[in-house]
Amino acid sequence: MFIDTHVHFDSFRDRAGISGVVSRAEAVGVEKMIAVGGNPDANAFAVSAAADFPGRIYAAIGLDRDQASTDWSLEPCLREMERTRVVAVGEIGLDYHYHPDTADRQKQLFGPMLELASQRGLPVIVHSREADEDTEGRLREHVRTWRGDSGRVGVLHCFTGTSEFAKRMLDLGLMISFSGIVTFRNADSLRDVAREVPGDRLLIETDTPFLTPVPHRGKPNEPALVVHVAEVLAKIRNDTVEHIAHSTARNAEALFFPNRKQDHERR
């Protein structure tokens, strides 16, 4: 069983499109997917997708760095949390690559998102690009006040950082998730990082519809293609795809829904 821990289902726009995605995912063994929000519309869509496909899709909601320049409010997030069971706060975080001019406003948004996660006892799904120092600083503050399970702080999604940054995130209790980038021809340094992440802290994702893995570059991404991420991880870690699937699914379940009695635990 595979679990794709990061899917932007709002890119499909309707239930029929999602139904096809879910069917294709199930056909290759992707049984669960985390629908990730990031703005009010994406949050609502994630919640609706989870309601339409219970047991297959689970919702995460939050306000990402792109919302920093808007007149954002926590109220829509709180309302969505009343509609369904939300398994994480995300996608949230910092990205200084495209908009370094909004760095201060991004940090002003990131803080309340972390506080919301702490209040709700939910893990965070964190994006960090060219902002690792500030990301680490905010996460250190978050961990100091975190009262939940130390293994459920959250995940650095679509990891592209250095091995040193990965180690510091692991020391804070976060998991590390790899996307299709790990399959790219020029990603040797990232594969070196992925080789060293402990097996009990490793997750996989597609970041659908972005970052389509090799050998499907140039085509839209979708959860069924997370298998290619697992294949590369198995190769570089001298492991089997089956074990990568099992271990990353187990890690995802421990992070996002630890109280569920899962099939793989009964086998």
Image (cartoon, helix red, strand yellow):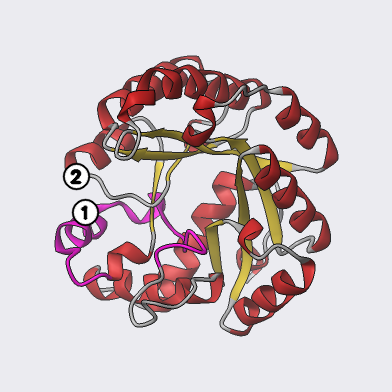
The magenta region covers 184-211
The image quadrant of residue 28 is bottom right
| Residue 258 belongs to magenta span | no
Give the image location of residue 70, x and y in percent: 57, 26
According to the picture, the residue beneath numbered tag 2 turns out to be 162
Q: Position of residue 122 (x, y in %)?
A: 61, 33
Instruction: Give whichever of discs 1 and 2 has the lower sequence position.
Output: 2
Q: Amino acid at mark 2?
A: Thr
Say if the magenta span includes residue 193. yes
Q: In the depicted view, which residue is nearer to us: 22 or 176? A: 22
Q: Does the CB distance between marks 1 and 2 fall below 8 Å? A: yes
Q: Quadrant of the C terminus?
A: bottom right
Q: Residue at x 79, y 60 (%)?
A: 54
Identify the residue under disc 1.
Answer: 193
Of the pair 159 and 100, the residue shown nearer to us: 100
Residue 227 horizontal side relative to residue 182, left or right: right
The label nearer to you, 1 versus 2, is 2
